Image: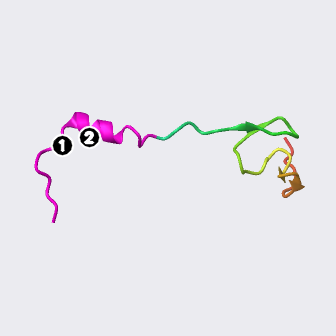
Amino acid sequence: MAVPKRKVTPAKRGMRRSHDKLGQASYIEDKDSGELRRPHHIDLKTGKYRGRQVLEPQED
C-alpha cells in the first residue's frame, strides 16, 4: 500500500486544488426570441429547441 513519505503542505494542496473550481455558467442569446438561455436547453419563453416547437409557450 502506498504511504506518503511527508505531509503535504497547505500551499501544495491548494495548488493542486486550484483547477477544481467551478467555472461561470455560459449563456447564449436565442436567435428567435433574443432571450438568454443555456446552450442545449429549451427556450422556455417560446418553447422551442433547435427550431422545433417542443413545449407550449409560457404566458407571462
Horizontal side of 9 relative to 33 (left or right) equals left
Count of numbered circles in the view: 2
Residue positioned 14% across, 57% down in the render: 3
C-alpha span from label 2 to label 1:
6 Å
Element under disc 2: helix
Does the segment drawn in magenta span residue 6? yes
Looking at the rendering, the stretch of residues picked out in magenta corresponds to 1-21
Q: Nearer the viewer, residue 15 or 38?
A: 15
Q: What residue does disc 1 label? A: 8
In the rendered view, how is the structure colored?
Answer: rainbow
Horizontal side of 48 relative to 4 (left or right) equals right
Q: Which mark is residue 13?
A: 2
Residue positioned 84% across, 51% down in the render: 47
Quarter residue 53 falls in: bottom right
Q: Nearer the viewer, residue 6 or 21?
A: 6
Residue positioned 18% across, 43% down in the render: 8
Does the segment drawn in magenta span residue 34? no
